[in-house]
Amino acid sequence: MSLTAFGQATDTIPNKDQTEIGISEDDFPDDALKLLGDISNVEKYKYYKKDSLGESVYEAKFKLKGEQYAVLFDSVGSLNRVEVTIGQKEITPDESLSAIKEYFDDSFTRFKLLKVKKQFLPKGDGLEVNTVIEAFTEDKDMSFCTVRYMVQVSGDVGNGTAKLYEVTFDKDGQYLKMESAAIQNMDNIIF
């Protein structure tokens, strides 16, 4: 048995089996649509339902001001998180980026970063999607939510096989979890 640098046995990395299907606006939770309705200047939403480990999550994807967003809701339409795709150099502060790079250098024999998402998780009820987007685009204080980074990486954790992983870090770049990503249906994923 081999271990990653942070003590997770490479043979115990959970698989993230996930199916994503495109759905119509009519199949999207009403409460979620109300929250999305507060966002101005979005021309088109794409709606999805994800099933992972028996749990359903609804996701709306859209572009706004040159940024690619995904907003995730639970089955009743409560906000789960807001994600925005960012470049590696947009991980701030620099210490966070350094900690993330150090994690990959220590845990993988070889790797390639594919995508970085900055995640904003509500710290309680009542958070509006528009508030998160405004704070992100205008570089305002984000203390009303928990900030995380999800990094999608293709790499080898020491077992000789390159796989796709999703690794989550806190705002300071400290490792939280890693999942082996096995996405079943990639027809609907926006790249």
Image: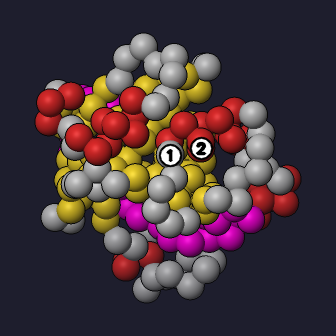
Question: Tag 1's secondary structure?
Answer: loop
Graded by Cα atoms within 10 Å as few (under 14), some (14 to 19) or many (20 or more), the crowding at tag 1 reads some
Q: Is 151 placed above or below 36 here?
A: below
Q: Is residue 168 left or right of residue 105?
A: left
**Image-quadrant location for residue 134:** top right
Q: Nearer the viewer, residue 159 or 15?
A: 15
Residue 171: give x, y in percent of width and height. 69, 61
Residue at x 62% of width, y 70% of height: 175
Q: Nearer the viewer, residue 168 or 123?
A: 123
Q: The C terminus lies in which quarter of the figure?
A: top left
Query: Residue 146, image x and y in percent?
Result: 61, 62
Give the spatial CA distance, label 1 vs label 2.
7 Å
Q: Amino acid at mark 1?
A: Glu
Judged from this view, the residue extending furthest toward the right is 94
Residue at the image point whose x is 37% and y is 17% from the top: 44
**What is the x, y in percent for residue 64?**
55, 22
Q: Under tag 2, what secondary structure?
A: helix
Please give left or right for residue 155 compared with residue 97 in the image: left
On the rendered image, what quadrant is the N terminus found in? bottom left
Q: Which residue is mark 1?
A: 128
Magenta range: 169-191
Q: Is residue 75 magenta?
A: no
Q: How many marks?
A: 2
Residue 183 or 53: which is nearer the viewer?
53
Q: Is residue 154 above or below residue 2?
A: above
The residue at 31%/65% (across/down) is 15
**Residue 49 - label:** none
**For residue 135, what is the image quadrant?**
top right
Q: Is 99 or 7 nearer to us in this picture? A: 99
Is 114 above or below relative to 156? Answer: above
Residue assigned mark 2: 132
| Image-based side of 84 in relation to 100, left or right | left
